[in-house]
Image (spheres, helix red, strand yellow):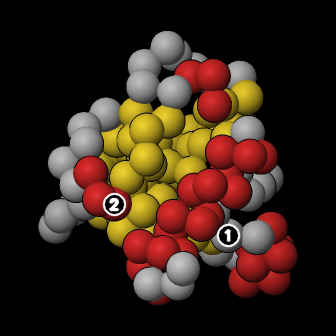
Amino acid sequence: MIIHQRDIVEIAFYTGRKPEAHPAIIVSVDEIFDTEGFFYAILLSTKNIYPDFTIEIKPEMINSPRNNRNGFAVFHMLQQFYPEDVITRTGASLKLDVFNAVLNKIQKTIFGTR
């Protein structure tokens, strides 16, 4: 399975004790996947439970969106995955400028960089 940074995939995401199907944004560089066979992704949710840790993602921020629903990129829900965790590839990806804003927010949220 070929996956790339910025791709949106449906994945078995651990939000509690067991994996649940959720869309996710692949945030790690392609070289990690090419070398190690795993990647890092953040959760996409329709709920904005932790507003300090999210940014709204609108359909116009996505290349080839699957639907017209708004969602939220959840920055503190960053996990490692393997190709077998991917349920489906959506064919969608974040636009580059939006992805760069997401990366900046991840850095600020998780690592406290400014």
Q: Amino acid at mark 2?
A: Phe
Would you name the residue on which mark 1 appears?
A: 28
Compared to residue 32, the image places residue 4 above or below, namely: above
Disc 2 or disc 1, which is closer to the eye?
A: 2
Which quarter of the picture shows residue 44? top left
In the picture provided, is 50 more to the left or to the right than 8? left
Q: Nearer the viewer, residue 52 or 41?
A: 52
Compared to residue 67, the image places residue 81 above or below, namely: below
Q: Residues within 10 Å of mark 2 (few under 14, many from 20)?
A: some
* Residue 25 in sight in this render: yes
Q: Residue at x 52, y 84 (%)?
A: 113
Residue projecting furthest to the front: 114
Q: Quadrant of the C terminus?
A: bottom right
Q: Residue at x 19, y 48 (%)?
A: 49
Q: Which mark is residue 53?
A: 2
Q: Residue at x 63, y 22 (%)?
A: 60
Does dot 1 land on a helix, a strand or a loop? loop
